[in-house]
Each structure stands twice: as C-alpha cells, then as structure tokens.
Image: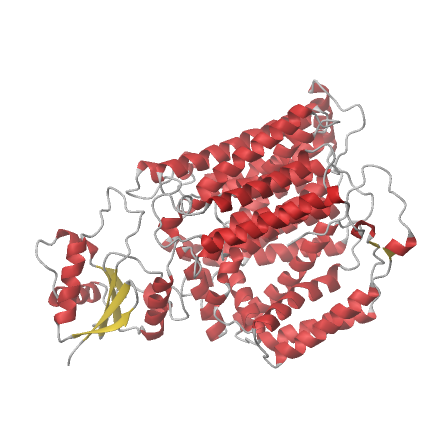
C-alpha cells in the first residue's frame, strides 16, 4: 500500500495556490461517518461476502481510531496513519478481552455500537482543520514518469513470475532455485528504485518512495505466502486453534494452556473475525505475514521522522528494517501483534512525551559533546521538551497499549520496558511515574500465572546470560542452533552482525557530531533488549526477539552512518547502495531457503481439520513419520492431555519385522495406562508420504518400507477402516470391539 506522506520541508515552503489547497476536509469525515453507519448495519445483520468483509474491516480499523486522533496536533502523516489504526485496535482489544473474560461474547452488537458512537462523534464534534495539499497531483513530465512506469512494470513482472513459479518439489534450497529469473529481476529493479530514490542527488518524492518501498515489502514478505495454498508456517496453526476456540465458546479457560492466559491477540482476532463474517481464522491468517511487515515498516518510518527531518535518513531506516528483519516473526501470532503495539508506544512517547533530563544527565551530555572530535557547527537537533503540559491523552494511550501488550504476550512487555524505563526515570520523557506504572502493569498481570509458568516451563534459564544466548534444542545439529541448515544460519548471523556493526558505527558518528541526546536515546533503546537474555532463553527464541526489538533502532543508526553529514557525497551514496544491496542478498537467502522445512501443505491442513472435527476425549492419535499441525481448530484441547497423541516412529525404525495392527493396539493400551486415562475407544493412525527436511543425524527418518508394511497390515485388517485419503495422507481408524 502506498503511504501518501507529505514531503518534509528542509527548505522554505513553496507558496501553494488556493485552488490546490483544501482546508476543513469535513466532506471526507461525513463520508467516513456515513460508511461507518452502513458498516454498523451490515455487521449487526451479519451481511457477508468478501467485498463486504473488506469494507467492514477497513471501516472498523479507521473510523473509531480517527474519532480519537482527529484532533491531534503535530502528528506526521505516517504517525497519524498508524495511530488511527492502533487506536481502533486497542479499543476493540479491550472490549474483546472484557467480553471473553466475563463470558459475555457479543462482538457484532459491540462493534456496531462502537461504529455508531464514532460516527456520531465525527459528525457532531469539530475536528482540527487539516490542510490537504494536492499540488503534487499535477500531470508529471516524461522524466518524472519513467520511475513510475518502471516500478509498475517490475510489479507486473513479479506477479507473472509468481504465476510461473512451480513449488511442488521443494528441496534443501527452498524457493531460491524455484523462483524464475523474472522474480529476481523484478525484486532487483524495485530495490534499485528504492535505493536510487534515496541516494540520488535529489531525493525522490515521498509518494514515489512510499509506493516503491511498499512494493519491495510485498515482494519480499508475500511471495512465499502467495505461493502456499494455506498458511505456510506450522507454528501458525496453534494460534488459529486458540482463536477459533474463543470464537466458538465465547470465553477464555486459563486452565487449558498458556495461550488462554495471554489471550489479547486471540480475543481481538476472534472478535474481528466474527464482525467481518470470517469466523475461522484459517481463512485470513496467511494475510498477517504481509500485513505486519507493512505496518512495522510504516512505524519505523514514522519513528525515524520524529528524530530527523532528513528524508534520506528516515527512508533508509525503513528500508534497512525491511531488509534486515529475517527472524520471520511477522506471521499470525501474538508476538507480532505485541511488537507493533510496542513500536506504536515508542512513537507516542517520542512525539508527545518529550522532557528535559536531569541535571547530571545534561552534564554527561556536555562531557560527551566535548569529547567528540567533531561537533556540528550549528546547534544540533535534540529531543527536547516542547514546554507545554504533557497531553493526558498520550499518557492514557501508552497505558492502554501496555495493558493490551501485557495481556497478549509473555516476553514483549519486559523487552519494551527495558529501554523505556531508564529514559523515563532520567527525564528524557515525562512523566517519570509512567516508568514504574508500565512495570507494575506487567507484574500485576504475570503474578497470578507464576505457579503455572514455573510448573510447566520453569523460570528463565537460571538467569544465566551465556546459557540463554547459547541455547539450542537437545540433539540439534551444530549447524541448526539458529535456523535449519548450516549456510542459512551463517547468512542470518552475517546479516545480524552487519546490521549491528553499522548501527553502532552510526551511533558513534552521531556522538562525534555532537548530537549526543538522540544518539544516547536511540542507542539505549537498541542495546537495552539484551538484558532479556539474563532472564530467559524463551525456548531458544529470546535471542531472536532481542535482535527484533533492537532492529528498528539499529536501522536508524545505519541511516545515521551514511546520511548524517551536511551534504550527500559520492562515497556515502556508493556505501549506502552497496550496503543495502548486500543486505537484500543475505535477506533473500535467509528468508526463502528454509521453505521446504517449514511449509505446511493443504493436505496436512485437510487431515488435521478432519481429525479436529472427530476427535473425542476417549480417542488416541498415532503418528508415524510426520507431525501434522494437529492444533488447528476449536477442539484442540483434546490433544493437550497426556495419552491423547503418541508416535510409533521409534518402533517402526527399530523393529526387524513388520509392525502389525496388534502392535499398534498394544502401544495404545500402554500409553493410556501409563498416563492413567480411561481406555481408548478409537485409534486414528496417520500415514503420510511427506518427510521433513529438518531431520538430523540424531533423528533418522522412518524407513519407507516400514511405513509401507504397516499400511499394508492396516489395509488388510478387518478391524481397521480407512476414513481419510488425500493425495499424500491417509488416516486409518481402529475401533475397539466390545
């Protein structure tokens, strides 16, 4: 999506004629309010269909938020855009959580009431008179049209490349050899247009840069998901299951699992799914990967614009973030949701809660300025207090964001607080009491869950930094400590190290130029997440989250490194071009190479959906050589108790004779007995032709002949019935007789 942002004004404003300048855009607000009333009616009467679902979702995300932020002063276009959506999301999240906790689940009436109230407020309350400048919409010259035509041709080429891509047989290099050369050409052209728009002597218009950067994000973050028939990542499905459970039951049961104890994202998703008429999260979960990526890039852009008026800096920061975010956390998940809310919180604090630091901090800044070998000849742009009273709405917004974050994800609140807490305490932002308030909200929420966390997961990794950062799963191959495969792990490390080193170099350059305050603030926000490694390994994912939370600020540091000088030089342009190109190459390898090891097929989903609809507490599922995404629907709690799912892979690998139906039954009896649950009534044996590429030397695959012999035994037995058969997966049912 194009971000229609107004150009910054490092030079005096050109005079705009009155015929190009429209003030008081009340007509647009009247239209939005009318659409809100129409959407409220459609929601209330549950009128569905894809076009109407898109319309209802768009109005739900815009109208309530616009009613809250329309009177804001001093907000940039990008900031106003994300604050509008964030305000709507937080509003619905609070309603969804309250309804789920109180077991008063009525999303459609509540959503309709919110839209009607927002429409009434927009119609009756005067808003800020916003100037809308249309002077840039004149007919472009031929020279100005060339980049636009090139961009359009590249995006069309990308679309054609996806149509021509056949990904049925993915190997160890994933999508890299599968993409046709047209895909790489399209990606290279769009990247080149982005870099040219930033590094050329004259920076391209913000309309063009917003469109080209959005196009690059689409190419990089949506190609894999567009090629997949279903959400491609296996860990997406447990989140789909929790969402569907809340939507089906209208309540939260904290005794089921940890997801029901941090249900913010799932409750919101179930709420919006009910509102737009898509009650199965499976139907829209795949859109999250692209959606979260776009939103995060817009947030980084908006944050960078609060720190600098130099367009090269904030567009480079947005581009670096897009090219270095390899950790693949944009999928349908509470962590992606909480991360975007954290960035929104940072944007509000940086924009509206600026303060004057303590005297000792100012003295430290003075020493660092004198220590620098080079200082800016002019007074450097610092983050300073506006001198006005702190807007109460901004404080309320930050607290509301923290409440939703805390209720959505376990780790995000503490990684967020690690950087903001000291900045609030020393006075860079105000009020100071906001720091302990954010911490207290997080602690009050987690305290009732401490026994559950300790009993099921244990606390941290012994608060051992080196143990947590070096965590790897038991039996993992040496090359798999970070991702699957030695080369992709090395590429990920190289991209991370490159981004980190360049970001730190940018902080140092900023200090040497005498711009101490912004360097200290951004540097602290970049390094503070490392403290999270002292607390937990988070199953090996903590280091990935630390990098993710540091990345927006490191991206700003990289931009400072190249564009902090008073003028653009040939050397900086070449350096920025080379750096961004290398990042793009590394990102492409890291992001698309592991596809074979993570891709979930539509047959897997169909088989799992079949089981979810039939499974009962007295049933047992037997897996052979492949792990289906069993947690996929509202009945997923039936899989969580011990004795409900077992694997006979070891039996198949070690047995010297064919495994029979009686062997499977004996295994089932032993599993149920050892877990002290009642005897089984039905056994579902899952046979799959798939084999995972993540198998290591310590986890050999099941011999194909053993699977074939078992399936032959099942097919020949009178006690067994084949109940599901797709292209690659068969499910056999064994029913207890008598």
Q: Position of residue 711 (x, y in %)?
A: 17, 64
From the viewer's side, name the closer residue of 608 and 554. Answer: 608
Q: Quadrant of residue 201?
A: top right
Judge whether residue 198 can be spotted in this image: yes
Q: Residue at x 77, y 73 (%)?
A: 120
Q: Position of residue 87 (x, y in %)?
A: 67, 60
From the viewer's side, name the closer residue of 611 and 228. Answer: 228
Q: Residue furthest front?
A: 142
Q: Is residue 368 left or right of residue 216?
A: right
Q: Is residue 71 left or right of residue 315?
A: right
Q: Quadrant of residue 378?
A: top right
Q: Position of residue 697 (x, y in %)?
A: 24, 41
Q: Quadrant of the C terminus?
A: bottom left
Judge whether residue 251 can be spotted in this image: no
Q: Is residue 80 left or right of residue 175?
A: right
Q: Residue at x 78, y 55 (%)?
A: 72
């Amino acid at each position: 999506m194009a971000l229609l942002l107004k150009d910054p004004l490092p030079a005096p404003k050109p005079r705009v004629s009155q015929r190009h300048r429209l003030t008081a855009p009340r007509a647009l607000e009247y239209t939005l309010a009318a659409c809100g009333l129409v959407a409220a009616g459609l929601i209330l009467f549950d009128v569905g269909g894809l076009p109407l679902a898109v319309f209802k979702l768009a109005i739900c995300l815009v109208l309530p938020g616009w009613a809250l932020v329309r009177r804001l002063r001093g907000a940039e276009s990008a900031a106003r855009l994300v604050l509008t959506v964030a305000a709507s999301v937080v509003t619905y999240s609070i309603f969804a959580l309250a309804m789920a906790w109180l077991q008063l689940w009525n999303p459609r009436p509540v959503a309709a009431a919110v839209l009607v109230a927002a429409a009434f407020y927009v119609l009756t309350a005067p808003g800020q008179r916003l100037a809308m400048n249309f002077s840039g919409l004149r007919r472009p010259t031929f020279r100005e049209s060339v980049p636009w035509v090139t961009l359009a041709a590249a995006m069309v080429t990308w679309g054609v490349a996806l149509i021509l891509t056949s990904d049925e047989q993915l190997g160890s290099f994933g999508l890299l050899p599968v993409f046709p050369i047209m895909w790489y050409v399209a990606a290279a052209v769009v990247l080149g247009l982005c870099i040219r728009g930033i590094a050329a002597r004259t920076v391209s218009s913000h309309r063009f840069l917003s469109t080209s950067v959005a196009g690059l994000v689409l190419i990089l973050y949506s190609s894999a998901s567009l090629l997949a028939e279903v959400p491609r990542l296996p860990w997406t499905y447990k989140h789909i299951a929790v969402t569907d459970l809340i939507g089906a039951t209208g309540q939260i049961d904290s005794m089921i699992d940890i997801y029901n104890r941090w249900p913010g994202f799932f409750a919101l998703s179930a709420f919006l799914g009910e509102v737009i008429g898509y009650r199965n999260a499976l139907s829209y979960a795949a859109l999250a990967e692209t959606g979260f990526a776009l939103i995060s890039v817009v947030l980084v852009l908006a944050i960078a614009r609060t720190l600098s008026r130099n367009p090269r800096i904030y567009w480079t920061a947005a581009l670096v973030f897009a090219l270095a975010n390899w950790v693949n956390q944009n999928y349908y998940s509470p962590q992606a949701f909480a991360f975007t809310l954290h960035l929104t919180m940072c944007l509000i604090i940086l924009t509206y809660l600026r303060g004057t630091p303590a005297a000792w901090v100012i003295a430290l800044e003075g020493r660092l300025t004198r220590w620098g070998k080079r200082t800016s000849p002019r007074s450097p742009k610092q983050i300073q207090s506006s001198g006005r009273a702190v807007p109460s709405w901004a404080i309320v917004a930050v607290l509301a964001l923290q409440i939703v974050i805390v209720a959505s994800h376990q780790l995000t609140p503490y990684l967020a607080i690690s950087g903001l807490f000291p900045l609030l305490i020393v006075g860079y932002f105000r009020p100071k009491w906001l720091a302990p308030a954010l911490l207290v909200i997080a602690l009050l929420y987690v305290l009732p869950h401490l026994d559950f966390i300790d009993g099921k997961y244990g606390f941290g990794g012994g608060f051992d930094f080196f143990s947590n950062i070096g965590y790897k799963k038991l039996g993992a191959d040496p090359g798999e400590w970070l991702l699957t495969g030695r080369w992709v792990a090395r590429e990920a490390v190289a991209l991370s190290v490159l981004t980190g080193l360049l970001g730190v170099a940018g902080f140092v350059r900023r200090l040497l130029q005498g711009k101490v305050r912004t360097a200290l603030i951004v540097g602290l926000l970049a390094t503070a997440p490392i403290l999270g490694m002292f607390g937990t390994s988070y199953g090996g994912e903590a280091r990935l989250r630390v990098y993710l939370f540091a990345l927006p600020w490191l991206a700003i540091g990289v931009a400072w490194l190249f564009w902090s000088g008073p003028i653009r030089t040939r050397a900086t342009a070449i350096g920025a071009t080379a750096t961004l190109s290398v990042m793009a190459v590394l990102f492409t390898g890291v992001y698309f190479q592991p596809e074979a090891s993570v891709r979930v097929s539509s047959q897997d989903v169909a088989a799992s959906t079949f089981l979810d609809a039939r499974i009962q507490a007295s049933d047992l599922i037997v897996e052979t050589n492949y792990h289906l995404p069993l947690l996929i629907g509202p009945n997923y709690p039936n899989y969580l108790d011990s004795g409900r799912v077992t694997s006979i892979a070891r039996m198949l690998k070690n047995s010297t004779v064919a495994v029979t139906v009686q062997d499977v039954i004996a295994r089932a009896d032993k599993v149920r007995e050892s877990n002290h649950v009642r005897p089984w009534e039905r056994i579902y044996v899952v046979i799959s032709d798939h084999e995972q590429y993540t198998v290591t030397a310590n986890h050999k695959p099941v011999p194909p002949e053993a699977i074939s012999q078992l399936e032959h035994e099942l097919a020949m037995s009178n006690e067994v019935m084949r109940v599901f058969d797709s292209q690659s997966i068969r499910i056999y049912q064994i029913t207890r007789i008598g």
